[in-house]
Amino acid sequence: MLSFGIVDDDSASRLMLQFIIEKSGLGEVVISAGNGTTGEKGILIAKPDVVLIDLLMPDQDGIETIYHLKQHGFGGKYVMISQIENKEMIGKAYQAGIEFYIQKPINRVEVEAVLSRVHEQWKIGCYLGEIKASLSKLNSLSPELGSSPKKRTAREIIQSILMDLGIIGEGGSRDIVEIMEHLVHRQHPETLPPLKELYEVAARANKGFDSDTEKEGKAVEQRIRRTVMGALTNLASIGLTDYSNPKFEHYAPLYFDFQDVRLKMKEMDENLKTDKGKVNIKKFMQVLYMEVLDRVRDEQQQM
């Protein structure tokens, strides 16, 4: 379970955030402070996994507090909270090391959505930390294993892109990896088969040849659709916070139709009813495939 710290000079905001975190089962609040100086001291003692911190506070603002915490070696994640919409200020907050940005007045749906993504990143970070620790032990036993850079596999390249899109933990991510890996290793690499064939590739990888491939293919289709919608939502959230964010600038116009991105951003910004089916799966898969191919070729040329 994640532990949280809250630093905000507005007591009502602190209480609301704590209520949302604990009522939603996202974790527990281990430190709550009304100013940056007190918050800094409490965080260094309590060492929460995630710090929700207000951008503007009278004694010591959020950015200054984050810099102080980093100087003292605190390595938790940061989520900024503020009414400020100035892109320059928000950009400075990202440079300071925040992961996400929550706009005031506080909205429960937005807080739960943002902190759920933080939780997913935290789990992935723990998993990667375990892998690095295991590799470090292997290298200490066999130093020659780490003597030269290792070429990334197609699977690792695909997973890195899905991680950038914030969907590596989604149900359909495994299906997408299986499909892309199959495409990379086949002949005629520049063409993309019909989606139905691709869904059946993942279906056979999941269930084997003796299963009902058509039925499982439909399940794969639904999982992938939900996962791609998750990528669109993640990018729209980043775009609302920081339109110049490198991930948004690269992935949003490349993987999705511009009108779909704008519609999703409008839905989130104005709390409109979500259009669950509005996403171009064919375009997403085609672009992902071409980007994976480019990165695989780059890896091969570097060796």
Image (cartoon, grey):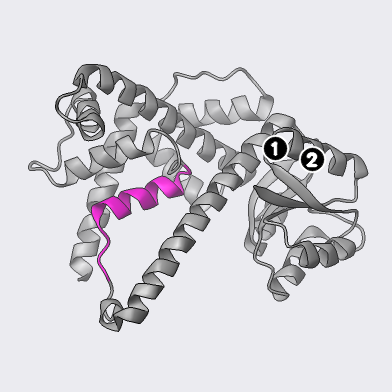
| Left or right: 171 as drawn, with respect to 54 | left
Looking at the rendered structure, the secondary structure element under dot 1 is helix
CA distance separating discs 1 and 2 = 8 Å
The boundaries of the magenta stretch are 150-166
Q: Position of residue 57 (x, y in %)?
A: 87, 56
The quarter of the image holding the C terminus is: bottom left
Q: Residue 17 has which mark?
A: 2
Q: Position of residue 176 (x, y in %)?
A: 31, 37
Q: Is residue 157 magenta?
A: yes
Check contact, mark 1 vs mark 2: CB within 8 A. yes
Q: Is residue 233 magenta?
A: no
Q: Earlier in the sequence, mark 1 or mark 2?
A: 2
| Left or right: 39 as drawn, with respect to 297 | right
Per the image, the residue denoted by label 1 is 111
| Left or right: 37 as drawn, with respect to 284 | right
| Left or right: 47 as drawn, with respect to 15 | left
Q: Residue 280 has which mark?
A: none
Q: Quadrant of residue 85?
A: top right
Q: Residue at x 68, y 30 (%)?
A: 109
Q: Residue at x 58, y 31 (%)?
A: 265
Q: Quadrant of residue 138?
A: bottom left
Q: Position of residue 278 (x, y in %)?
A: 44, 21
Q: 96 and 115: which one is in front? A: 115
Q: Position of residue 256 (x, y in %)?
A: 41, 33
Name, please, the residue furthest toward the left: 187
